[in-house]
Amino acid sequence: MYEITPEQPQDHAAIEKLLDKSFGEDRFKKTAYALRQNSNSIPELCLVAREAGNLLASIQYWHLKIAGEVPALLLGPIAVQPERQGEGIGVGLIRDTLQLAKSLGHKIVILVGDPAYYGRFGFSSAFEKGLELPGPVEAHRFLVCELEDGALDNVKGLVTGHKALSDLALN
Ligand SMILES: CC(C)(COP(=O)(O)OP(=O)(O)OC[C@H]1O[C@@H](n2cnc3c(N)ncnc32)[C@H](O)[C@@H]1OP(=O)(O)O)[C@@H](O)C(=O)NCCC(=O)NCCS
């Protein structure tokens, strides 16, 4: 049985190895990575699943701004060790963290991912809602989810990374 806990600095190497395995080493060229370079992660929402000391999965969330003013979260990366995929670990991590994000007062979550997977959590096309990214992305993979009804009303524009001062103080 695995446990889910906040990510710790000592998890960093194992997480990077899992992400290399899951997304390849050219993952750093992707638009989602460029967003993260201008952002900081949210410690309460960066979790790992661990079993007998081994890392099974990692999920991270980062600060964004829409049109320079409306706060949002970037979900990702999320990865589950290949030999443990299909056991519900990914769905569990996403459901729990979206719930936690909502309870912390976050209202909008954005990601670049497979709509067939993320639709079940309430994600749908971000382009159709008038959002844009500062780099190339396959249009159908740019997704957004409201954690509060109406959070995206009258919200349109460019999504950028954001460095939140309160988190910088903690890091
Ligand atoms: C995507 C990933 C995080 C899912 O985690 P997981 O623990 O394997 O997923 P779960 O077991 O919780 O969920 C399995 C369900 O998701 C579906 N699923 C998994 N990957 C999918 C995908 N890319 N597209 C559509 N459905 C997908 C499965 O068919 C299954 O559906 P079911 O519940 O109807 O049977 C994991 O497969 C992974 O790490 N993949 C490599 C990295 C990656 O692609 N990350 C996501 C980037 S957007």
Image (tube, helix red, strand yellow):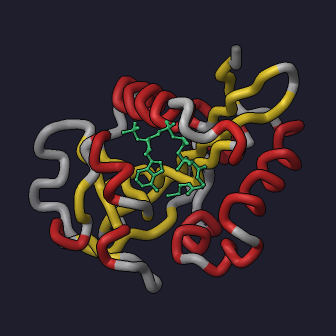
Where is 144 relative to 140, above or below?
above
Where is 133 relative to 57, above or below?
below
Q: Residue at x 39, y 79 (%)?
A: 138
Quadrant of image for the N terminus = top right
Query: Seen in the image, is 75 located left or right of residue 24?
Result: left
Number of numbered discs on residues: 0
Q: Residue at x 78, y 47 (%)?
A: 15
Image spot of residue 159 (x, y percent): 37, 69
Image spot of residue 58 (x, y percent): 66, 41
Query: Seen in the image, is 159 located left or right of residue 154?
Result: right
Image spot of residue 52 (x, y percent): 85, 19
Q: Residue at x 59, y 45 (%)?
A: 60
Where is 159 relative to 3, above or below?
below
Quadrant of image for the C terminus = top right
Q: Residue furthest top?
A: 1
Query: Seen in the image, is 134 located left or right of residue 150?
Result: right
Image spot of residue 28 (x, y percent): 69, 74
Q: Residue at x 25, y 73 (%)?
A: 157
